Image (tube, grey):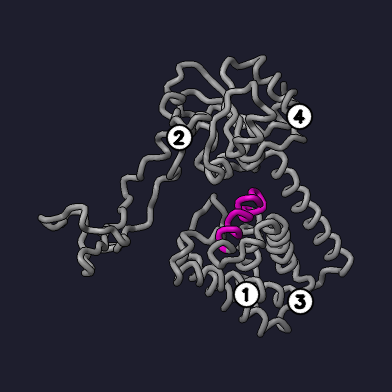
Amino acid sequence: MQNFLKILRWTVGLLFIFSGLIKANDPLGLSYKMQEFFDVWGLSFFNDYTLGLSLVMNLLEIVTGIALLIKYPYKQTLWVLLVLIVFFSFLTGYALFSGKIKTCGCFGDCIPLSPKTSFIKDIVLFVSIVILLVNHKKVKTNLHKAWGMLILLVGTFSVGYGQYYVLAHLPFIDCLPYKVGKDIVEQMKLPANAVADSIRLDMEFEKNGKTYQFDPSNFPADFDSTYIFKSRKEVVLLKGNGIVAPIQSFTLNTLNGQDTTDALFTISTPYVLVFAGQIDPSIPWDTLLTKLHNKHKLVFIVTADKDRATSLLSKEQILIGDNTMIKTAARVWPSVFVMNGSTIMSKTAYTDYIDAH
């Protein structure tokens, strides 16, 4: 029994540490996933607090995992883990049974899990923690209280500093589809094993007080302007396997709304894209842009903040992109991408670029 409890304890502890470390590598990624849940629940007013919640959640996962391994404080740690896993099970269960969330973000973007896999994992962890809690008196620790506190304090400080660092300098490990070496055009292609949903579009029209429904391939022979459009809806005939392209949308427009993505990707010399969803006036833009222009002929600002960009950066070439796309491409705003066609040659947070040049 002792060996079984030891294996169970180490398995649960290491899984919590591993899960926390992956998310601590990219706390903004978890923050965006929390916002997805809040938006679905109609609680968007919590979105301003998701980064703080993300930082605390990652820290709690890792520190409780460490506490479980050193068995200090043992019983209290198990109760905290039980509360955490009940909460996680609720989230993964909601993602699975509602179908409104495609991934729960349990292991961040590095190891994307389906809602079904995530939910099963959480149920297994729940049962494991309950077993450990029921048998907590059978597990003893010889670790001195002072050493236990020191280990937990060092762990807390290390995780806190690590999260602070990645928020300013980009994640240690880039698991996003926009990492160095990736070709954006290739990343937008569906994988060979992807099976899309089979969908029928049902359209509803009204004519002479009567309602008619048909799909676009079966319009009536007498269809004309006397048919008044009322509504349309998509009906899923056959569910696909949920596999999608790593990058589902990447479009850059000029200030007058012209799509310039293809033209940009055909530029024959290296060029720079500076991603910043919002243009923060406190950023040393003059210093950054001077250094960029000293090394590169073509520099483009990619932002969703058109008004402030045209006001503060009027001398720059500005491209407008979707804010969600920019969030995914660059965790730190602004970030400097050196591009060769559609391939990302380098990716640097603005602070690191200024310091290095």
Q: CA distance from mark 2 to mark 3?
A: 48 Å
Q: Looking at the picture, how far across and down is residue 281, in whole percent?
A: 74, 35
- Does 14 appear above or below 286? below
In the rendered structure, find residue 3 and report the number of the disc placed on it.
1
| Residue marked by disc 4 | 284
Mark closer to the observer (4, 2): 4
First in sequence: mark 2 vs mark 1: 1
Please identify the quadrant where the C terminus is shown: top right
Q: Which secondary structure class fits the magenta region best?
A: helix
- Does 164 appear above or below 311? below
Q: Is residue 70 left or right of residue 336?
A: right
Q: CA distance from mark 3 to mark 1?
A: 21 Å
Q: CA distance from mark 1 to mark 4?
A: 58 Å
Specify start and end residues of the magenta stretch as a single range. 22-37
Please identify the quadrant where the N terminus is shown: bottom right
In the rendered structure, find residue 76 and report the number of the disc placed on it.
3
In the rendered structure, find residue 184 and report the number of the disc placed on it.
2
For label 3, the SS is helix
Mark closer to the observer (3, 1): 3
First in sequence: mark 1 vs mark 4: 1
